[in-house]
Amino acid sequence: MADSLHRQALRIFKAALKAADPVQAVLNHVRREKEILIAGDRRYNLKSFRNIYVIGAGKASARMALAIEQLLGQRITGGLVNVPNAVKLRRVEINECGHPIPDRRGVAGARRIAKIASEAGPDDLIVCLISGGASALLPLPPPPITLAEKQAVTRLLLHCGATIHEINCVRKHLSLIKGGQLARLAYPATLLTLILSDVIGDDLDVIGSGPTTPDPSTFADARAILEKYRIWSKLPRSVRQIVSSEIAETPKPGDKIFHKTQNVIVGSNALAVDAAAREARRLGFHTLVLSTFLEGEAREVARVHASITKEIRASGRPVKPPACVITGGETTVTVRGQGQGGRNQEFALAAALAIAGLRDTVILSGGTDGSDGPTVAAGAIADGTTVTRAETLGHNAAAFLANNDSYSFFDALGDLVKTGPTGTNVADIQLILVPS
Amino acid sequence: MADSLHRQALRIFKAALKAADPVQAVLNHVRREKEILIAGDRRYNLKSFRNIYVIGAGKASARMALAIEQLLGQRITGGLVNVPNAVKLRRVEINECGHPIPDRRGVAGARRIAKIASEAGPDDLIVCLISGGASALLPLPPPPITLAEKQAVTRLLLHCGATIHEINCVRKHLSLIKGGQLARLAYPATLLTLILSDVIGDDLDVIGSGPTTPDPSTFADARAILEKYRIWSKLPRSVRQIVSSEIAETPKPGDKIFHKTQNVIVGSNALAVDAAAREARRLGFHTLVLSTFLEGEAREVARVHASITKEIRASGRPVKPPACVITGGETTVTVRGQGQGGRNQEFALAAALAIAGLRDTVILSGGTDGSDGPTVAAGAIADGTTVTRAETLGHNAAAFLANNDSYSFFDALGDLVKTGPTGTNVADIQLILVPS
């Protein structure tokens, strides 16, 4: 029983991975019917376009381009994507650049991407492919700000306590491409942006700092943030000059350029969770999605999952067995020990302790990128026998958890989830299975 | 809107408190129709009993006895309950004794309770009232173990790392009353035990160490536990003597004495959560109970609740607005700061940070005993404006949380939940409300 439950949990998890695969994600949301390309709520008549360019940046964007080449083939005029790892493409050029610290290759590529966008005409279509890491992979500081100065500002921002929204507000105002400016460059060409989101909540203006999304924030906001965190006076002169000048403001919501722009999320944690839920229902589980915004200390979040598992067993709430409860998001681990592991394996280990002895239940936690922390596993599976099975090996689950040694723990039991690198990242998925 | 949401959350919480009130809890589960007393799945014909005795122990047991006096009045022959605080009763004697450390008054009362039970005959009915604290309030060590020696063992057990089930296994074998032995004393009288459970999961043999419940554990198990945690050699000689003798084993499941025994849970976290859910539905909320087994570090568990709140707003999952999600259980707080607060107020403060800016939602966390930690509040209510309202007072929510100062934080905002001491304890209740 436990074995078949493990297998079912893996199948559901793999359905999530499939939906997050960059090629699959694009093909799930963009289809071609003869000369019509259908994406989101719009139809693009390919015959009406003179040129089709493919641009973009991000860790998964090369494989997204592969899918677009499958769809559009010879219709693609050309293009360029800034990515950290090469993939073989036919029509779209690959520019390998530094990540997560932006480098000169990144700047050179961003400049060429901006040029492609600005030279495109009203009869051209630009397909823009954005995925995780796009912020660092699309560096284009306005002169006189140098790359080194921009890097220095980024470091100051990351350590001052500002929120991701505040950091992005500043970033957008120290760039010629972010905060909707790529859409302005592309106008009056038609712009279709496909997004594989690694951001919880899928906030369009957060993913890659929203190069093709309206930016409600202003230079004044950026300055207020820099002053609030007391880093204004530490900034390079060029940066203060740009922020103070308040010229070339980012395009705002309602700007006419966005009438020719469509942003479509093709992959995200929510879409992966949806795919997992469909697979769970197909396997006969009553399925409940609790959240795709999950956050918190992994071991504590796991205890909440265990408490829900116990309730399902005790009362059939919140969902009757055969039950599947799914969550998505990204937990954190406060490392105190010396062991090997990652947030998903630590989640599974804490869950194992909390459901020890509970018959016929499994809890799986896995990262969609396939490598949880610095390990070769994506995550692990816990069940009611995990703790006692470990005891027979002489392993104390609580001691392994205290040492953050979840990888060694599950490796010994053979209960790691191993997928290999998936080439995508839409955060993590957690599953609870309780058969009837 | 926020105000009316706060009021609705309070109404739902108060419905839970009402169901947990000791008098109300008994009256909800025991009723009298002329000469028939109906409790659980049994009917007791009062005319068939010569005497009716009321015995018991626990923090809420005096008020439970009050309810029994309302139902049975003059039919009560007499009886005695061991409690920490007196209540005025007519027929049942109150014995105030020490808690949580058992004292001589407790032993004297336990001895009299055992005598009442053992002297009752086949035509007598014993109503036994058990509530939180009953373990400490019913101390009756077998000779030659002295009270002081039993206290010493309890201290060793509490600090050795044993689980509550392991501690109870030992306790039951160092008592003449626990682990079903009170039921054996009462046999062949008819025994009706009413239980107000403060134990998550309502394990009958854990609540008050199960004085009227079969005990599957043995002296050999008790010895194995004492050896496992390496305290066997530190024990008083009398204790080792009793455990080694293996005489007077506790009554086991299937023992005939339990045919005349019924245990009825009249109050519990699960029953309080049910009452809250009924009230939420009455107010028009789509209502989902997630768990009555909630545990974990309060601030992290709160973040999970916030992540569910965000999902309800974003997608109407796991339940469509107007939505109410209810959990019950008992979180913990790792104190690092100097402030004032309790686990429920800390939960609300962490929730406030995680839902900051989210419109029209509230999260309430409250303890059913009415005093959260060492404060005069039962808990607090958080909403999407909590953090900004605090800022206008110059209060930084994150700083108050870091200092475990949730009481001061919510006191200043007027968002404490104050009920006064409720005289009951069925752990905590958490509510999420998201109107449509």
Image (spheres, coloured by chain):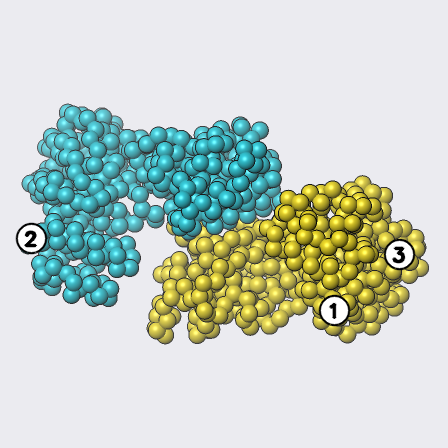
Chain colours: A cyan, B yellow
Task: State the CA–CA distance, disc 3 to disc 1.
Answer: 22 Å
Does residue B107 lie above or below A289 as drawn?
Answer: below
Is label 3 in contact with label 2 (beta carbons under 8 Å)?
A: no
Q: Compare residues B142 and A239 and report the one nearer the observer.
A: B142
Residue named by callout 3: B118
Element type at mark 1: loop
The location of residue A26, given as percent across then percent down, is 28, 33
Q: Which numbered disc, 3 or 1, marks the residue that appears first in the sequence?
A: 1
Look at discs 3 and 2 and give the one toward the viewer: 3
Q: Crowding at label 1, few (<14), some or many (≥20) Cα neighbours within 10 Å?
A: many
| Helix, strand or loop for disc 2 | loop
> Badge 1 is on which residue?
B97
Identify the residue position indicated by label 2 in the image.
A143
Q: From the viewer's perspective, is A324 left or right of A170?
A: right
Name the kind of residue labelled 3 in the image. Ser
Label 3 lies in what chain? B
Depth check, front residue: B18 or A259 = B18
